[in-house]
Amino acid sequence: MEFVTLNNGVRMPVLGYGVFQIPKEECEKCVLDAIKLGYRLIDTAQSYFNEEAVGNAIKKCRVPREELFITTKVWIDNYGFEKTRVSVLDSMKKLQTDYLDLVLLHQPFSDYYGSYRALEDLYKEGKIRSIGVSNFYPDRLSDMCAFNKVIPQVNQVETNPLNQQIRAQENMKKNNVQIEAWAPFGEGRNNLFTNPVLDQIGKKYQKSVARVILKWLIQRGIVALAKSTHIERMKENLEVFDFILSREDMNKIKTLDTNSSLFFSHQDPATVDYFVELIKKRRDHIGSDYEKRASK
Ligand SMILES: NC(=O)c1ccc[n+]([C@@H]2O[C@H](COP(=O)([O-])OP(=O)(O)OC[C@H]3O[C@@H](n4cnc5c(N)ncnc54)[C@H](OP(=O)(O)O)[C@@H]3O)[C@@H](O)[C@H]2O)c1
């Protein structure tokens, strides 16, 4: 495994295993398989509802805790100073660990300033080794860097050959924030796994399209998160350290950029509406964790 060094000196693996959309019943086994294969960075979130399963895997995997790099993300409904603190301590309990390597604010909406203050406190208390944000585009990220004591260590954003985040990465570099890619494969949208340019490059190196994509990200200095529930694909995605893409091939991939999301734009007000609806639906379904706790 290769590592990047964050702006506070913490070392983070350049390639991780993401558990978005892995049902909690499957998740423990998937994470155990991933760790066995050699993944050390595991990326979950409060909103994935599988933190307990990840925690069980952390407990059972027999890899020393300090060799793992565990990330979770604070869900918008847990934003605000007090709620964020309570929710992160709760995540730590679910993840069966007494510290977290990275905690991110999942979305750039609602009271993210209050939440960030709570993360700063937990960071200063040594309960979180690094803190950051996700889906913060240049305007909001620069704002966060300018008006907080602790500069975010990481910003996790959708990054794949069709949405390359060139400008966002430049802004992160300027602010000394590490970029991390979610949906490196665009979840397979727009036939990314059979894209002719990537396929042709893959044939040249005798590597799959998935490996070419992950290598392209790592060569750009981007931490990549790959998700698969299939053990053979988990293995395939990890084997990217034995070849280097030429400058010419990196430039060919550059031509695929559409500079737009395969999912939704965080700058579009309709996306805010979408999250408001999602919060409501989840509250109706399970109730807010914080409110349940407060009413006890
Ligand atoms: N911060 C955020 O807002 C945010 C949003 C989304 C995701 N994330 C994080 O980023 C991680 C990765 O993103 P993602 O899961 O959305 O999408 P992704 O990694 O782009 O794509 C996952 C899809 O690719 C397939 N796949 C994986 N490896 C493959 C291979 N070698 N060959 C063919 N197909 C392959 C998987 O199928 P199988 O599973 O069936 O193998 C799955 O359908 C997530 O798990 C999560 O941790 C964060």
Image (spheres, rainbow, N blue to C red):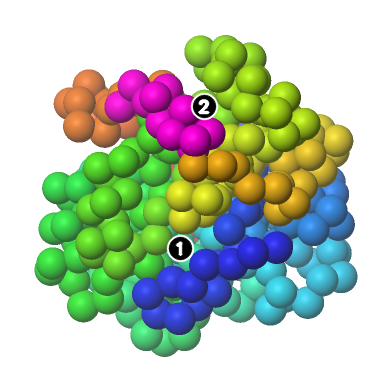
Residue at 75 percent across and 64 percent down: it is 58
Q: Is residue 101 above or below residue 191?
A: below
Q: Would you say the residues marked 2 and 1 are in contact, meaning their CB atoms lie under 8 Å apart?
A: no
Can I make out residue 116 in this image? Answer: no
Closer mark to the observer between disc 2 and disc 1:
2
Judging from the image, what secondary structure is the residue with disc 2 in? helix
Please give the residue where the numbered disc 1 appears in the rendered image: 103
Residue 35 image point, x, y percent: 79, 57
Amino acid type, residue under disc 1 in the picture: Val
**Residue 186: assigned label:** 2
Q: Quadrant of residue 39?
A: bottom right
Give left or right: position of 131 versus 223: left
Please tell me whether mark 1 sits on a helix, a strand or a loop: strand
Q: Is residue 187 magenta?
A: no
Q: Which mark is residue 116?
A: none
Counting residues from the start of the chain, the first of labels 2 and 1 encountered is 1
The residue closer to the viewer here, 296 or 109, is 109
Give the answer, above or below, for where 182 lies relative to 176: above
Residue 177: image location, x then y, percent: 33, 63
Q: Does residue 110 lie above or below 280 as drawn?
A: below
Q: Nearer the viewer, residue 211 or 10?
A: 211
Over which residues does the magenta segment extend?
248-259
Determine whether, in the image, residue 176 is placed left or right of residue 47: left
Task: Let me know if residue 198 appears in the view.
Answer: yes
Type of residue at label 2?
Gly
Q: Pointer 2: residues within 10 angstroms few (<14), some, or many (20+)?
A: many
Rendered location of residue 90, percent (x, y): 53, 64
In x, y percent, where is residue 5?
48, 73
Q: Is mark 2 within 8 Å of ligand 1?
A: yes
Label 1, residues with CA under 10 Å away: few <14, some 14-19, many ≥20? many
Distance between the Cα atoms at labels 2 and 1?
23 Å
